[in-house]
Amino acid sequence: MRTISDHIEHVKTQPHHVRERVAFGLAVLMAGLIGIVWLGVSLASGSFAIAGNGFAQATGAAPFTVNGQPALGDTSGLAGAGAALPPGDASAHIDVIQDDMGAAPKGTASANQTIIPF
């Protein structure tokens, strides 16, 4: 069995392309070992853990409310204001209106209507 210094001396006698492969292989091996140790320590210490399960808990902000009332049900896993809608509300829909001017037709606008000109 050779010692490390014997192995180094043996590699020094090899051609340049072999020495480059040995150097590159050792660099990849050392970087991999350092990466594995770093990942293991990071996972064990909990540095990747998410504080809280919602934006309000993570930032310390007030919980989401609709018209001053707390949102219905558990909305921690849902995104946006759609989670706060009561289940009996009408579903969202899109009405396509042909209009050359890009403006809303007169007399059809309501509080719940949004027109996007194309």
Image (tube, rainbow, N blue to C red):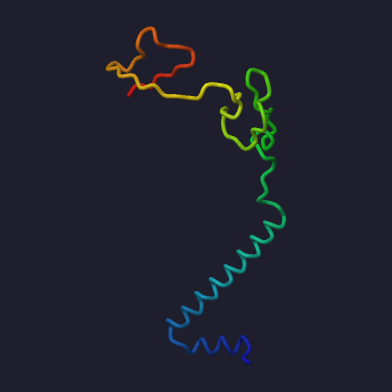
**Extreme-left residue of the structure:** 100
Residue 19 position, x and y percent, is 48, 82
In the picture, measured across the screen, residue 17 lies left or right of residue 89, that is left
> Residue at the location (56% across, 86% down)?
8
Image quadrant holding the C terminus, namely top left
Residue 3: x and y in percent read 63, 89
**In the depicted view, which residue is nearer to us: 87 or 109?**
87
Q: How many marks?
A: 0
Q: Quadrant of residue 44?
A: bottom right
Q: Name the residue at 65% across, 61% down.
A: 38
Q: Residue at x 70, y 52 (%)?
A: 46
Considering only vertical position in the picture, is 118 above or below 34?
A: above
- Location of residue 89 in the rendering, given as x and y in whole percent from the top left corner: 56, 21
State which quarter of the image contains the N terminus. Answer: bottom right
Q: As displayed, is residue 106 above or below residue 89?
A: above
8 w.r.t. 74: above or below: below
Identify the residue at image location x=55%, y=75%: 26
Query: Which residue occupies the foreground of this view, 112 or 41?
Result: 112
Q: Quadrant of residue 96?
A: top left
**Farthest residue, direction right:** 45
- Residue sitting farthest toward the bottom: 1
Instruction: Check the image and report above or below for 98 versus 8.
Output: above
Q: On the image, which quarter does residue 43 sit in?
A: bottom right
